[in-house]
Amino acid sequence: MEKNRQVGGDTEAIREFPEETLCPSCGKFVGAYEKCPYCGTELKKRMSIIFFKRAALVLAIGGLALLWFTATKIKIPIVRIGDINARMNNAVVEVRGKVVKVSMTGRDGVSFDVDDGSEQVRAQAFRGRSKMRELGNVPQVGDVVSVVGSIQMTEKYGTSLMINIPSRVKVTPARVERIPIGGATLENQNKLVEVVGEIVSARQSGGNIFLSIGDTTGVIDVPLFESDLNRVKDREAISTIGKELRVVGTIDEYRGKPQIKIRDVEKIEVLKDDTIPTNKIPGYEKIREGAEKGKKPGASREGGEGESESQSSVFF
Amino acid sequence: MDYILILIYTILGTVIGGLLSMIPALHIFNVAGIALLAWFAWPQLIPEVALPAFFMSQLVAWSIINTIPSMFFGAPDEAAVFVVLPGQKYMMQGRGYEAAILTGVGSLAAIIVMALLTPFCFYTLPAIVQIRSQNLAWILLLVVTYMIMSEWPKGTGLGRTRWEKFKWAWANLVAGIGTMALAGFMGFIILNRTLVPLEMSFQGIMPVFVGLFAVAIISRNLVSRQEVPPQYISSTIDCDHRLLAKGIFAGTLGGGIAAVTPAVTGGIGGIIAGAATGQRDDRIFVVSQGVSKVVYYVGAFLLFFVPTLMPKGGGIARGGMSIILKPIFTPYTFEEYFQILAAMMISGALAFLMMFPLTRWTIKLITCIDYHYILWIALGIIFSIVWGLTGWMGMFLMAVGTGIGLIPAFYHARLSNSMALLLIWLALSMAGHGPAVLQFFHLD
């Protein structure tokens, strides 16, 4: 390395710097700059630095463009829920399966459990419920869904699928079978059905409403819980004895008896026509007598925690 | 018996972490990922009761001792980027040993401060975390805005023509903002697509970080012809209690902001704290960066063990180590917190003592061997790890990250702008605009 002298002042200062890092005009140290910041002289740089500078730009911009193109073409992998393990944490994957449970969370969140036959996983979106409603892809129990999200695994909360994009949830609605109320038996538990029945009793307990609806083939209970009631369109009508309702729900079991678990309370339809002859509803008189006396008839039920007879009231 | 196991694995973790820290550009999160894979295969290697202490001690050792290769080989991680500049200045003056020990003093002070802040963590921090959670989008947007705005002012342009002056004045500004934009866009891609093999998703963004920081800076230093002058081994440091206190305060503030806020790393916390505290002295800066790095890395992991941070109990998973470990381990109790605090303190003390011989050894090494050879070896190790864990796609991600990381390196901009990789996506996602952005770029 040459010793470069800077002449000036009372003493000569000897500096040892590589020649290519000094300005050829004023001799000051300029490092990697292409133009001297002191005197403005253009500096001839070593090829390698200029090459790396250009290469950096090409690599960054070109590489990013290629990466973006690849990312738009790459298919999101579909995984079996049972195959998810800790090494897949943070992976963006797609799972497909049947919805077994749905909960509305927070102000705008939704979570649902998906079962693909191997295991279940909870898919959750902390925001986007309203967007999913707009898109019509809020899943219901029984629907088949395809969900894209990122796997989040913690030892505390287990495995969940975080949905960042509401439109990445694709819902295939479950097939609904229209059956008479008498066909809603425990042999058909978990089946998604549509029934039409006349309200034969409506009992309020706390914030919940317990309906019994019947047609000529039988009578069945339909509980409506407080958390869902604020979404009901016509609350008075659905608890008026004699009104006929069309409800969609899954056949559930409570204390050994079948009941209909409503799929979406917003979709309960109050029918205008009276198509069911009231006196042909099996056990109707007994139910009405029980309702008038304020007792709990055999066909009706208690529900909700902490309920007591003294808290119930009957609608007429 | 459990406590003896914890002590043994704390010491073991410190020694292993300390030695591995000497490999330039090898990040502790890479090491933790490999250690975790090894534990999955052979769980008898580390008893479950000692697992958190083992990883904590490795983290503490790395965050203290990694200053040495960062400074002497010029291969810092993002949190150490700012210590390199004054550190290398010290090195060119033959005071590299003193600079390393000054940083180490800051790191030791950070360990003590974190232990003393325990009551604050239990009683005040939960409220801060709640407020932060509800306003995270705004906080991150502010951080991004500050990072952009702090690029100004720059010096006036030099040149004969107006265009030359304009170009000169705006070149590194454009480089800084351009780095943010490119890194931000890359973040949209890698955080919404799994491009590495599915079984390695837990290290999915590792190749990008390696490219952005490690490979970029090593590449720049390989091109550099800088020679290291002889270093003097001093027995005292040029610092008094006042400067030390100022450095500790600034570093704790910067590291604390980074530890609590997602996507804000030690380097960004250091920028904010530096501006907030108006640091002028290089010594304060070097000390504060030592504090900041430890508070950020170790403090973030420590928050995982604070049982009062969440309304229903438990800590928060901040930082890479918590995210790596949370699928297999969740601390619940105060006892676990104090165990890990003890491991942190023991490891901190050991790591600080290890700094002295390791720094002397490093100085001897660089006077005997051209450090460029060491950088080539480090590059080879990094390439092997990335390729081994994530394959060719990981190498491609690393290459693109390197390209972006070289822009600030060669165009005199701030390397911390590369953290836009996480910052911008997280800010937009928290603000509810993530889906719209992804739809715009056809990434939905």
Image (spheres, rainbow, N blue to C red):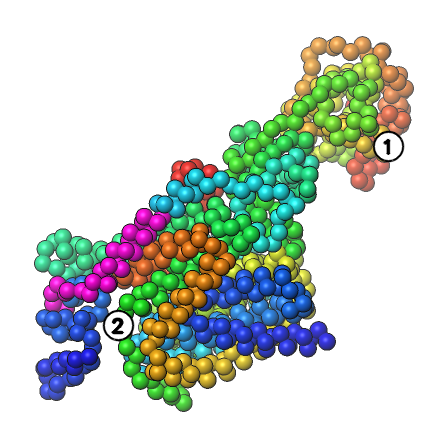
Relative horizontal placement of residue A21, taking residue B202 as reference (left or right): left
Is residue B168 in sight in this rendering?
Answer: yes
| Residue toward you, A172 or B344 | A172
Identify the chain of the residue marked 2, using the numbered disc in the image: B
Residues rendered magenta in the picture: A38-64
- The quarter of the picture where the N terminus of chain A appears is bottom left
Which sits in the foreground, A181 or B212? B212
Residue drawn at x 52%, y 73% as measured from the top left: B17
Q: Residue at x 50, y 83 (%)?
A: B353
| Quarter placement of the C terminus of chain A | top right
Expressed as whole percent of the image width and height from the top left, the position of residue A230 reads 65, 31
Q: Main secondary structure of the magenta part?
A: helix
- Give the residue at mark 2: B225
Q: Which residue is mark 1?
A: A256
Residue type, numbered disc 1: Gly
Q: Quadrant of residue B241?
A: bottom left
Q: Amino acid at mark 2?
A: Arg
Considering the numbered disc 2 on the image, is that residue within a helix, a strand or a loop?
loop
The answer to whether B74 is drawn above or below residue A303 in the figure is: below
Name the image quarter holding residue A52. bottom left
Residue B363's spot in the image, x, y percent?
38, 82
Q: Is residue A48 magenta?
A: yes
- Is the same chain shared between marks 1 and 2? no
